[in-house]
Image (tube, rainbow, N blue to C red):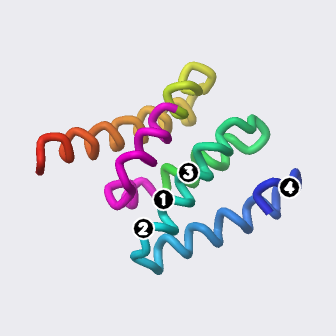
Amino acid sequence: MLKSTDSSDIEGALTLLWELNNRTLDERILNGSLALMAELLDREDIRERILEFLARGADHLPRANTEVLKQLREKLKSISNTQKGKYKEMVQLLLDVIDDVLSSRKSGQ
């Protein structure tokens, strides 16, 4: 569904991922979702929806593993200069949260 060009398919898939991440504590689902979102940020046609999804689920980021967070951080950095307005703010918010999580892990907190 996420490979579709139909916006209702994409919205449905994102809603399903959102519900799965909210209802389960399984980090494999969260890590898989975040890795997939990092990949999908390459698609300009759905990038804004992906950023909205990530921003809405930012409170889940501390549960993600370090490698997935680093992957997502690099992808967000690579697109940050192409975004404008609220989407640029979303990218910055997500980068700040990821950096905070990684810093706290590094310092052992």
Which of discs 1 and 4 lies nearer the camera? The answer is 1
> What element does badge 3 sit on?
helix
Query: For the residue marked with disc 1, what is the amino acid?
Result: Asn
Spatial CA span between label 2 and label 3:
12 Å
**Quadrant (top left, top right, bottom left, bottom right) of the N terminus:** bottom right
Q: Alpha carbon of mark 1 to alpha carbon of mark 2: how far?
A: 6 Å
- Residue at which label 3 appears: 35
Q: Which residue is mark 4?
A: 4
Question: Element under label 4?
Answer: loop
Residue 107, above or below 27:
above
The residue identified by callout 2 is: 27
The residue nearer to you, when weighing 7 against 103, is 103
Identify which residue, 95 or 71, lies in the foreground: 71
Q: Which residues are the magenta region?
A: 57-74
Lateral position of residue 35 relative to residue 47, left or right? left
Residue 93 position within the rendered picture, expressed as x and y whole percent measured from the top left: 40, 38
Main SS category, magenta section: helix
Residue 72 painted magenta: yes
Residue 31 is marked as 1
Report the residue at 27% width, 42% height from top: 102
